Image (tube, rainbow, N blue to C red):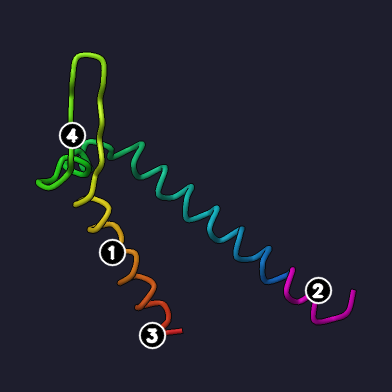
Amino acid sequence: MNQHDFLTMHNIGKLILIIGLILVVIGGLIWLFGNIFGWFGNLPGDIRIKRENFQFYFPITSMILLSAFISFVLWLIRRFL
């Protein structure tokens, strides 16, 4: 293992740790303030089909909104770092 491989693994370890911390913070916020996000998943455009023995749910609008938010946050991070 040369020096370059060590730095790459070191950076991957940092990235995994940061992602884990972000997930813990988001999980804590949802746990404490879950009722604030009650609208998410119930937006107009989210597909919900209920039959007698069958349920299908596909949150198209919610996922588009989430994708736009994540893209914006990543754009901000790349812009300022």
Overall secondary structure of the magenta stretch?
helix
Amino acid type, residue under disc 2 in the picture: Phe
Task: Kindly identify which numbered label has been placed on residue 79.
Answer: 3
Label 1 belongs to which residue?
69
Question: Compared to 79, does 34 lie above or below?
Answer: above
Q: Residue at x 64, y 65 (%)?
A: 14
Q: Which residues are magenta?
A: 1-9
Which of pointers 3 and 1 lies earlier in the amino acid sequence?
1
The reply to whether the magenta stretch includes residue 17 is no
Label 2: state its secondary structure: helix
Q: Is residue 30 left or right of residue 3?
A: left
Task: Kindly identify which numbered label has been placed on residue 48.
Answer: 4
Front position among marks 2 and 4 = 4
| Measured Cα–Cα span from mark 3 to mark 4 | 38 Å
Q: Residue at x 38, y 85 (%)?
A: 79
Q: Quadrant of residue 10?
A: bottom right
Amino acid type, residue under disc 4 in the picture: Arg
The reply to whether the magenta stretch includes residue 2 is yes
| Measured Cα–Cα span from mark 1 to mark 4 | 23 Å
Which of pointers 2 and 1 lies earlier in the amino acid sequence?
2
Which of pointers 2 and 3 lies earlier in the amino acid sequence?
2
Q: Residues within 10 Å of mark 2 (few under 14, many from 20)?
A: few
Give coordinates of residue 11: x percent, y percent.
67, 71
Q: Is residue 26 left or right of residue 61?
A: right
Question: Compared to 4, does 30 lie above or below?
Answer: above
Which of pointers 3 and 4 lies earlier in the amino acid sequence?
4
| Measured Cα–Cα span from mark 3 to mark 1 | 15 Å
Q: Residue at x 40, y 49 (%)?
A: 26
Amino acid type, residue under disc 3 in the picture: Arg
Task: Kindly identify which numbered label has been placed on residue 6.
Answer: 2
Which of pointers 2 and 4 lies earlier in the amino acid sequence?
2
Q: Is residue 63 left or right of residue 79?
A: left
